[in-house]
Amino acid sequence: MKFLFCKTIPAILLVISCIACNTEETKYAEDMNTTMASDTLLTPSTSNNYTTKEIDSVSFAAYNDSVETILSNLQVSEAQAQELSESMSEMIEEAKSLQKNNPNQEGNRGLESFKKDLPKDLSTYLYMKVDSFPQKLLPNNTKNLYIGAASENEEQYLYGLSNEGNLKKLAKLPTDFLFNPYKKTESYYRDGKIFICSEQSYKATVICGIFNFDLAKNMLNFEDQTATDFSVESISKAQKAVEKGNIIEAVNFYEQVAYPHNYMQVETETIHLLKKTYSVLQRLEKQQKYDSATLVLESIFEFWGTEFLLNIETPQQLQELFKSNNFELSQKEYIQILEKYGSLLLQSKKYLDAVEINKKLTQITPTSALAYLQLGNAYYNLERLQDSQNAYKKYKEIIAKTGQEADKKTLEQIEKRLNER
């Protein structure tokens, strides 16, 4: 939850300063014989329906841009923005009134009087609104409830926000449940109880304390707590999808895991995913579903879990990785997956991606003739003739040294392209 009031109060004061500085312009506008067209400022009413409030054009010009900038840069909900807008409008009107009552004094005198009367709680309050709390159950002269503290080091309280915009401590938040004040997530009223939720540090575990609010005694009575962890749930769903061969679905679930290294062995989990992918690719190739195979491999190599593989830059690093880990996927199978990916990218005319993958192949398997052939084809289709010819020459060199068989038609095409200028 953002430090809403910490950010907004200085901004509001800046807006009011602008109004104070425009005293003479306002007076001049009021004395003009020609009637100026008035603007309207939309402000929310207490029923959350918008009403129009007339303000003079000069005042509007003095703070309209600043207000829009403030609200556009705040990460708040629509309801919070409405409440803030209402408070800002009230404060601005009060400052204007103070200013008009002191026409012969410097403009900042009215501002200083306003700052002096500003509720201290509002200046530093860090809060989370209790959503859906019934209006009829609220204490007298209270329009909303909030959970928070006046500063980071203070204890958490249930606050009431009065109709005048002042905060009042209603009840201290019990300490006999797990609550992280730095990562509040939500608070709401349901079935006669107040739920106060926060996310644990470096985990995706959200713990919600369940409380009964005794209005007569101003007490929050702790009753129970619930814990949910969407990372655990996402991993479980991903693993089930992998076993069914639904690779793209599995990757989508893995992508939802927060703090993955705190929940799973990333390398082991990723290698198992690649092993299943290897089987899926063989099936799709037999069915000639090349587009589907391309989508599967794109999802795999865009997945953060494969970064440790794509970061390998030499044959020695690749060999050491597979030698030191008892992976169920062999080094040869991994190379075959990359080669297939490079080939499918060419077929899909995704030549830039094909360059990237096949170039990676030439780094970790410099004796792979196929990698240089595919790299040459990708460069050629990008009209990078010199790069393509260099790759084709390397391809010919490898097949000559290793005695690998080469397709006659492929060799003829390479020779033709090598002779191009």
Image: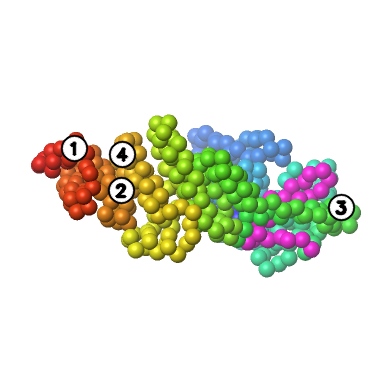
Q: Say if 172 sits above or below 146 in the image.
A: below
Q: Residue at x 79, y 44 (%)?
A: 190
Q: Nearer the viewer, residue 193 or 226?
A: 226
Question: Is residue 140 in view from this perspective?
Answer: yes
Residue at the spot of label 3: 215
Residues at marks 3 and 2, CA–CA distance in whole angstroms: 69 Å
- Between tags 3 and 1, which lies in front? 1
Residue at the spot of label 1: 408
Q: Say if 259 sits above or below 284 in the image.
A: below
Residue type at mark 4 is Leu
Residue at the spot of label 2: 358
The reply to whether callout 3 and callout 2 are in contact (CB within 8 Å) is: no
Badge 3 marks a residue whose secondary structure is loop
Residue lying at the far right of the rendered structure: 216
Residue type at mark 3 is Leu
- Between tags 3 and 2, which lies in front? 2
The reply to whether callout 1 and callout 2 are in contact (CB within 8 Å) is: no
